[in-house]
Amino acid sequence: MNAAFALFASISSIARTVLLAGGVVVAAVAAVDWAARTRRISPFNGVARFLRSNVDPRLAGVERQVLRSGGHQSATPLWAVVAYVVIALLVLAALDMVLSLLGQAMAATTMGPGGILSLLIHWAFAFLRLAILIRVIGSWFPRAAASPWLKWSYGATEWMLGPLRRVIPSVGMIDITPIIAYFALSILEGLVT
């Protein structure tokens, strides 16, 4: 277990360095691409032609999304940087989560079977709280409930939120049952462990 923890710690450290270096490169390329798109540099020089032939095709998906949402195509490189930062943060958060889970598992194994049972209970409650948070954030987007990326959170929490909804009325247009369920899970976890 210590070897796995050390391996993930080194992978996380290397990933941070690689993602930071990649972010600097992406930001520099995006700045030059933005300058070429806004005619701050000549669109006919070698750099601009290189960007049009090599970088712009890779940004086609981002450009479609920018244009669909009413943005200008010159904003595409800037949105590509934003997308890179978000993806990099998600990757780092996932690596940190794996490191945290490995650290918790290592600590639980030193406490014997009771520690392992306590850890599994903690993980179950943490999973339910995460599912509630993802469901709440997903409810802000109209088509998110049908998305396979978020559908699992509805299945994991409806058994708890459905009965609460029948008992607790909404406050105007706001459904407060996820908030109540989140705090009830925290209290219940404290009672169980």
Image (cartoon, rainbow, N blue to C red):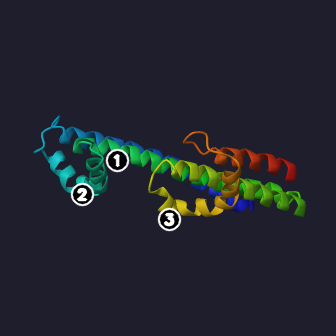
Q: Amino acid at mark 3?
A: Pro
Residue 5 placement: quadrant = bottom right
Residue name at image x 19 percent, y 56 percent:
53
Q: Between tags 3 and 1, which lies in front?
A: 3
Which residue carries the number 1 mark?
80
Spatial separation of the CA atoms under disc 1 and disc 2: 12 Å
State the residue lying farthest toward the top: 40
Question: What label sits on residue 148 in the rendered view?
Answer: 3
Q: Mark 2 highlights which residue?
A: 57
Q: Nearer the viewer, residue 95 or 4?
A: 95
Q: Is residue 68 visible?
A: yes
Element assignment for label 1: helix
User: What amino acid does circle 2 point to?
Assistant: Pro
| Mark earlier in primary sequence (1, 2) | 2
Q: Are marks 1 and 2 in contact (CB under 8 Å)?
A: no
The amino acid beneath tag 1 is Ala
**The residue positioned farthest toward the left in the image shown:** 44
